[in-house]
Image (cartoon, helix red, strand yellow):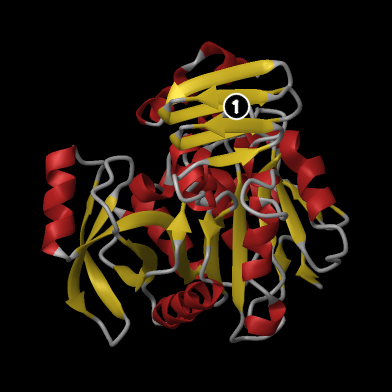
């Protein structure tokens, strides 16, 4: 229900408002994920798409409000199709990609200042929904008291592809100050973080009040805040969609919420979350999320694996036969073929074909 132009009433004061970000092209999962239909909208783990799973985790029955989805024009049709039947969902359509600081600010300006936002990427996989919801409630409680909260994902291995949060002093039984944000480390530093036990992966999931976020964005990136406000003021509503003004939005600097706000605020907090999380960031991560047989092999589509170990095969039609290989990924999709070692999966996004399709 619209309160006035540019703002939405919350359904209840204590509800958590999911803000689901649908951006990016998913090039590291090429050729399955493509610019026209990237990984959030694909059923990569189970029968539901990653986007549908994200929406389902934030169920009304668990205390969440209707979702606000921020997406671009290129993906609007996918969002509408996969939200079918949810008449309360709202969509903000970015006229151009300006990264997460601007995307979150758009959603914040569409909510009352006191509303607690839970910002979720649309392309993550979480196996323990109960743990996710418990972490969300703990984060929302901190957010209601003025903190800007990150989910600190329990680090299970010395990953070099994630940023890290260093846990600081306790705020309450569930929350801690963030002592510092750490960019993606090398292997040696990642091993040190894991051994220390006070570091967690930065999963890109956040909770804060809409007004608190806008205050901090204005303090640390006043131009971004002002330009988003201008884009919203000149925007237009089309049914459940809100379209910011394209000319004003196009002036906004491309900057992530981490750089613009979270690494600068003195109100950064974290809740630790052990919830079976994966960002499905490449074929190796997808292989781990899917699991495998006794030899660690996984096959989707017509395939035969003989004397193989830790091999992933996915094919949309042509039969694939693999003999005597280990730690290899083979993908056939739409006439394109990818063959890589599991270690090389991090580099798939650098392929020319992946960037252009």
Could you say which is closer to the camera, residue 300 or residue 32?
Answer: 300
What is the quadrant of the C terminus in the image?
A: top right
Residue 12 seen in render: yes
Residue 350 location, quadrant: top left
What is the quadrant of the N terminus in the image?
A: bottom right
Seen in the picture, residue 20 relative to 7 is either above or below; the reply is above
Q: Residue at 39%, 65% (x, y): give it.
A: 151
Q: Position of residue 192 (x, y in %)?
A: 11, 52
Seen in the picture, residue 323 relative to 9 is either above or below; the reply is above
Seen in the picture, residue 337 relative to 14 is either above or below; the reply is above
Q: In this figure, which residue is indicated by the disc labeled 1?
A: 331
Q: Position of residue 220 (x, y in %)?
A: 34, 51
Residue 33 location, quadrant: top right
Could you say which is closer to the camera, residue 305 or residue 3?
Answer: 305
Residue 84 location, quadrant: bottom right
Q: Position of residue 142 (x, y in %)?
A: 39, 79
- Outermost residue, top side: 352
Please tell me how crowded label 1 is: few (under 14), some (14-19), or many (20+) other residues with Cα within 10 Å: many
Left or right of residue 287, residue 1 in this image: right
Seen in the picture, residue 310 relative to 167 is either above or below; the reply is above
Q: Position of residue 346 (x, y in %)?
A: 40, 30
Could you say which is closer to the camera, residue 162 or residue 332?
Answer: 332
Q: Residue at 38%, 67% (x, y): give it.
A: 148
Residue 26 seen in render: no
- Outermost residue, front side: 307
Q: Secondary structure at mark 1?
A: strand
Left or right of residue 347, residue 243 in this image: right
């Amino acid at each position: 229900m619209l309160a006035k132009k540019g703002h939405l009433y919350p359904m209840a004061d204590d509800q958590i408002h999911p803000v689901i970000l649908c951006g990016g092209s998913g090039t590291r999962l090429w050729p399955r994920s493509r610019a026209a239909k990237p990984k959030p909208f694909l059923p990569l783990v189970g029968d539901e798409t990653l986007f549908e799973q994200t929406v389902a985790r934030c169920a009304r029955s668990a205390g969440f409000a209707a979702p606000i989805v921020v997406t671009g024009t290129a993906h609007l049709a996918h969002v509408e199709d996969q939200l079918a039947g949810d008449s309360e969902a709202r969509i903000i359509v970015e006229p151009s990609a300006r990264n997460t600081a601007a995307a979150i600010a758009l959603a914040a300006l569409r909510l009352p200042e006191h509303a607690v936002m839970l910002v979720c990427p649309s392309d993550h996989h979480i196996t323990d929904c109960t743990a996710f919801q418990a972490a969300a409630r703990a984060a929302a409680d901190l957010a209601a008291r003025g903190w800007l909260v990150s989910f600190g994902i329990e680090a299970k291995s010395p990953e070099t592809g994630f940023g890290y949060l260093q846990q600081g002093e306790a705020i309450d039984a569930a929350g801690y100050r963030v002592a510092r944000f750490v960019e993606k480390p090398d292997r040696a530093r990642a091993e040190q973080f894991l051994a220390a036990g006070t570091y967690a992966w930065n999963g890109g999931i956040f909770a804060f009040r809409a007004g608190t976020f806008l205050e901090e964005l204005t303090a640390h990136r006043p131009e971004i805040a002002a330009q988003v406000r201008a884009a919203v003021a000149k925007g237009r509503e089309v049914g459940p969609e809100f379209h910011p003004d394209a000319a004003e939005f196009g002036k906004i600097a491309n900057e992530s919420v981490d750089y613009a706000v979270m690494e600068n605020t003195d109100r950064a907090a974290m809740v630790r979350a052990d919830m079976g999380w994966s960002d499905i960031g490449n074929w190796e991560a997808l292989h781990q999320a899917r699991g495998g047989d006794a030899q660690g092999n996984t096959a989707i589509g017509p395939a035969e694996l003989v004397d193989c170990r830790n091999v992933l095969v996915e094919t949309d039609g042509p039969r694939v036969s693999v003999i005597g290989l280990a730690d290899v990924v083979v993908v056939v999709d739409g006439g394109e073929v990818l063959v890589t070692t599991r270690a090389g999966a991090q580099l798939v996004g650098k392929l020319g074909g992946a960037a252009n399709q």
